[in-house]
Amino acid sequence: MMTSTILRTATRYLFPLLMLFSIFLLIRGHDEPGGGFIGGLLAAMSFAMYALAYDVPTARLMLRVDPKYLVGVGLLLAGLAGVFGLVWNAPYMTTYWWHPETGPLAGQHLGTPLIFDIGVYLVVIGVTLMIVFNLAEE
Amino acid sequence: MLWAVVSGFLVAFIAPLVHRLGRRAAGPVLALLPLGLFIFFLSHLPDVAAGEVFRHEALTWSAVLDVTVSFYLDGLSLLFALLITGIGTIIVAYAGTYLEDHPDRGRFYVALLSFMASMLGVVLADNLITLFVFWELTSLTSYILIGFDHEKAESRNSALQALLVTALGGLALLAGFVMLGLIGGSFELTELLNEREAITGHGLYVPMLVLVLLGAFTKSAQFPFHFWLPNAMAAPTPVSAYLHSSTMVKAGVYLLARLSPAVGGTEVWLWTLVIVGGVTMVIGAYLAIQQVYLKRILAYSTISALGVLVFLTGMASAEAETAARYAGTAFGAFLLGHALYKATLFLVAGTITHETDEKDVTKLGGLARAMPMTAFAAALAGLSMAGVPPFFGFIGKELLLEAALQQAAWAWLLTAAAVVTGTLFIIVAGLIAWRPFYGEVRQTPKHPHEAPAIMWVGPALLATLSLLIGILPGYFGTPLTMPATASVLFAGGDEAARTGLLEEHRLALWHGINLALLLSVGILVLGVGLFAAHQHVMAALRPVQWTLRIGPAKWYDIAFKSVIGFAGLQTRVLQSGFLRVYLAITILTMVGLVGYGIFRLDDLPVSLELPAENLWAYAYQNLYVLVTAVMILLGTFGAVHSRSRLAAIASLGVVGFGVALIYVFYGAPDLAMTQFLIETLTVILFVLVFYHLPAFPTVSGKLSRGRDVLIALSAGTVMTTLVLIATSVQVQERISDYFVEQAVPLGEGRNVVNVILVDFRSVDTLGEIVVLAIAGVGVLALLKLRPGRKRA
């Protein structure tokens, strides 16, 4: 769309940083400001930046999958995050946590809410990019 | 029992795979499932016949709402379950061959097996809500089955009609069930069955009854809702056979019989059922003999048979004990008898059409020589339908007559209705089982041959059962139908009455010479005579043919067209296609509703706590907030007065970032971040559509600007007042305090906002992302599917 060398170069360097930051926001979200929604918006934005600086086909190539699959997978993950409880006859969406004591994840806590948040993250990326890419292709 | 229901759905999932691997063998292989279930249920027969009932609570769905997934097996459920699985076995095997060349056979098995499982769920459910869920599942799966030939408009319309009629009834039923559960104090049938006094004496009994009956009558195609059933004949014949003999339409009858001990026994119940059932049985039979297509004849005769069953369920609530017992016994016997012969006749009709490509009964004849086994099955089933001894149909009809004769009031009229129906049934039986097979051989589009074995073994088996049970009613009939009768007549807890009935009453061919027998003989003579003179009867009926054209099917068409017309009208009025109009309607609705609510308050509970004495010091301390507020206001004015679109967007951005700053000041970093990102995204989206928008100054003139100012001001006023009220009134303890306290101990997270989103309120969030996804798909559709554009 715009053939600005500055924008293109900046995008190339900013993109990985923004993506890392969005994943960082996603993972820290349970304890510090952040979360799947914010992280997802940021990730979508970094792809949208690519679409602006280069063009939509390039941005689609970066994403590798069609955004609509992200929406589907995200909804599936978020929906499945709640079924663990049903196995032990607890209500849907009951959360479970895992506290690893050794290994690289020692001291962290991982739980079903993280799966749920990853689902939200993917849905937000998918929907936003679905709209952005299609508008840009007009 | 849970697995008995669930296995059907599970096998349905792998059915297409079985079909792909098994090809021709898929039908018989998949039939093993219903066969296994049939044997499973059969193994319970001795216990149930001895008066035992089984209850199994599989899952607590929602303890607060008293909804459990629980199952219940007694005589009535067992009889239905045996019919569903037994006839299901034959249907699944038969369908494989019948639809041999159909490309969508794999999908057909999915729908058929899911339908069977849903139907089992209906008859085994103990909880009303569980029952309702399965009830709706039968409507949905039968929609797919009826519309199976989805490339034909006729199929699609019929399927939609069936769905609309039964789903409307389903809505009424849901309301009725909720009322019944509240009146009776439980949603478990086992408990409701012992609450007859409390239920029938309640002030809301009649409204509840009307709703429940609406559900049952639409499902069971009772007059005036009968019209959808003949149209449902668009389904492949094995489906029709299944829907009509033992499932779908019988669900309504099952429900009435099931609820009879709980909500029956009143005059309203008795007479509603007797009148509706009686009218349906006579009209159905009358319409049946007017048809010329095999399946339509059978369809109308099914309506009539359903009428008989409703009629009998009603009479089973009669005050006199013998009358009630006769009606109850007749119910069980007729149910079984009808299922056996109706399934056979449908399958026979399917075989005839499959082998000859002809469905008009007046163009068929002399097929017995070419298709001896099919003719044999048809003859047995036809004789049972006609009520000729020693077939089982005879026992059912005898009991029907006896039940009508025993009634305290209007016995002669009820008996006359039963006699008319019985006579017309003989004509129907003749049309289906005699006319195509005997007489002179007629030319058909396809030269007839005997069908493959799998297509006549099933019908022949069912027809032989009709004869066998008829000859030995004590051995086969009584243990099958009398426990069902007991369930219709007595509540679950009434053990003494139940076992008493089971010990005293047995089905028998010979009841001695009585009035019912004489009537039976009369019916036979009259029926055979009328069948012989069928041509003349039809000629005599011609002057009243016009009555057929003003039936309820016409009303349905009118109602359907007016709904569509109304939808079109209100779409034209409301959906102008202009975003500004939508916004104005949405905002004005909000202003109207909220404004009215505020207006209704006696005094505005708004308290503005300003530190009045040192206002200047206060303002100075919060100078950064004031500056931001001024910035937001300036941005707003800029947006409104700007003469260029770019400037307007930039001004709006100032407003958005200002609001985000306020979030930061008051300690809501998550909100602030979201707001920042959304503002940025808005700019990106705007850049993308910039060149597609119309020139800016022409968007609105002076007049429309004035109008928009009014709308905006009213919305602003109402929202401000609302926020002020919301922050000053504290009705209950703030739930946010609870969330803040519990975020770490319960939610294992220090970010309260995120803990609420992904844990405490995760189902809400799930709903929201679903909405988000739908909105995304909507945008996609708007962009991609505009008229005059190639599909992407």
Image (spheres, grey):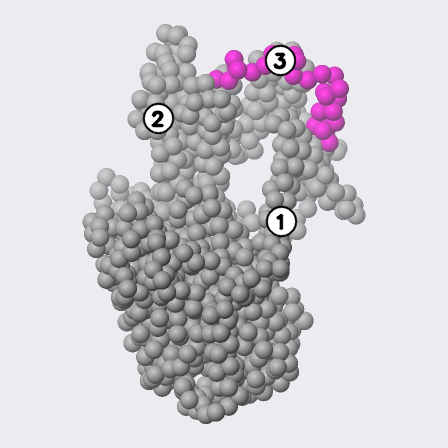
* Residue B553 location (% of width, % of height): 58, 54
Q: Residue at x 39, y 71 (%)?
A: B382
Tell me the mark number nearer the camera, choosing from 2 and 3. 3
Question: Is residue B392 among the parts visible in the rendering?
Answer: yes
Query: How many neighbours does mark 2 have within 10 angstroms: few (below 14), some (14-19), or many (20 or more)?
Result: some
Q: Amino acid type of disc 3?
A: Phe
Disc 3: which residue: B696
Give the residue number, with chain letter if any, for mark 1.
Answer: B559
> If the image is split into quadrants, where does the N terminus of chain B sit?
bottom left
**Which labelled disc corresponds to residue B415?**
none
Crowd band around label 1 with a 10 angstrom C-alpha radius: few (<14), some (14–19), many (20+): few
Residue bounds of the magenta highlight: B688-714
Mark 1 touching mark 2, by CB under 8 A? Answer: no
Above or below residue B483? Residue B718 is above
In what quadrant of the picture does the C terminus of chain B appear?
Answer: top left
**Inter-mark Cα distance, 1 to 2:** 56 Å
Q: Amino acid at mark 2?
A: Met
Q: Are marks 3 and 1 in contact (CB under 8 Å)?
A: no
Residue A60's place in the image compared with B204, above or below, is: above
Q: Main secondary structure of the magenta part?
A: helix
The crowd level at tag 3 (other Cα within 10 Å; few <14, some 14-19, many 20+) is: few
What chain is tagged by disc 3?
B
Q: Real-space Cα distance between discs 2 and 3?
A: 37 Å
Residue at position x 62%, y 60% from top?
B544
Q: Amino acid at mark 1?
A: Ala
The residue singled out by tag 2 in the image is: A19
Locate residue B357 relative to residue A131 in the image: left or right: left
